[in-house]
Image (spheres, rainbow, N blue to C red):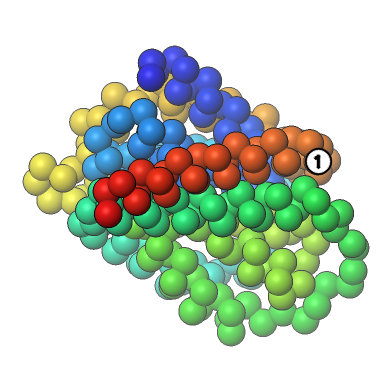
Amino acid sequence: MPISLIAALFLLIATAYASVGFGGGSSYNALLVLSGMDFHAIPAIALSCNILVVSGGVYHFSKAGHLDFRVLMPFVILSVPMAWLGGHLQVSEHAFIGILGLALLATSMQMAWNALHTPVRQPEREFKPWLIGLPAGGFIGLVAGVAGIGGGIFLAPLLYLVGWAHPRKIAALSSGFILVNSIAGLAGQLTKPGLLSPAGQWLASWPLFLAVIAGGQIGSRLGTRVLPETWVHRLTALLVFYVAVRLLLKWVELT
């Protein structure tokens, strides 16, 4: 698959994910796996794209008053070191594709749910971030570091489940969570020993980084002002589900 086509797809993914506070790491990973790239370099590239996308989201959500850093802190205290550890761990291609496929499947299910159910504005429930944030953040951080994602696709459903806040605040918290975990996970990936270091291919992927910067700016601006159109969520969920199935079938072949 030519780099120009991958860059165009990355731009679309970044726009769609940034509008709801995500970075798109799972989908970047999947496209690179299906393109045949060496899987050792894939997580570092996807995490870098995550950082570039959600940095804009964190800025725009903070400026709009949706991101509360005091609530974010309990989630990242354990997630950051665990994301670094997950990124530094040596995992097989079989394990990497399996974890990534399940992450994408969870993403598609969440997107489909959001597209099919109009959120009802209710009073925000009492929320104790330290009670939920420490254990959830640590577990999500480890999985995120291994899979080369930011972990927002696991955090957001949890926050919706406990009924903490309206969608924009959850999207804002997810953006901050993804940013710090992606930085920690990338540090872990780039410090892997010897031949496992992905630094060479990571530097050669600069066209993809430019594409997600543009897409992230477009999506994050949309997300702070209006909720994305329902049909966009449905189409994205369908596409992500298709890619998840492709990856899981590849995982079965490797088993």
Position of 120 with respect to 107 (left or right) is right
Disc 1, SS? helix
Q: Which residue is mark 1?
A: 230
Q: Quadrant of residue 109?
A: bottom right
Residue occupying the point 37% across, 24% down: 206
Tell me, yes or no, if residue 179 can be seen here.
no
Position of 155 with respect to 135 (left or right) is right
Is 95 or 212 nearer to us in this picture?
Answer: 95
Image quadrant occupied by the N terminus: top left
Q: Quadrant of residue 188?
A: bottom left
In the rendered view, would you say 76 is above or below 57? Answer: below
Residue occupying the point 64% across, 40% down: 238
Q: Position of residue 41 (x, y in %)?
A: 27, 39
Local packing at callout 1 (Cα closer than 10 Å; few below 14, some 14-19, many 20+) is: some
Q: Position of residue 142 (x, y in %)?
A: 38, 65
Residue occupying the point 60% across, 37% down: 239
Tell me, yes or no, if residue 31 can be seen here.
yes
Residue occupying the point 71% across, 50% down: 112
Q: Position of residue 75 (x, y in %)?
A: 53, 70
Q: Position of residue 193 (x, y in %)?
A: 12, 51
Position of 162 with respect to 80 (left or right) is right
In the rendered view, would you say 182 is above or below 49? Answer: below
Q: How many marks?
A: 1
In the rendered view, would you say 133 is above or below 250? Answer: below
Is 159 or 74 nearer to us in this picture?
Answer: 159
Q: Residue furthest left?
A: 194
Position of 36 with respect to 152 (left or right) is left
Q: Looking at numbered disc 1 in the image, what kind of residue is underneath it?
A: Thr
Image quadrant occupied by the C terminus: bottom left
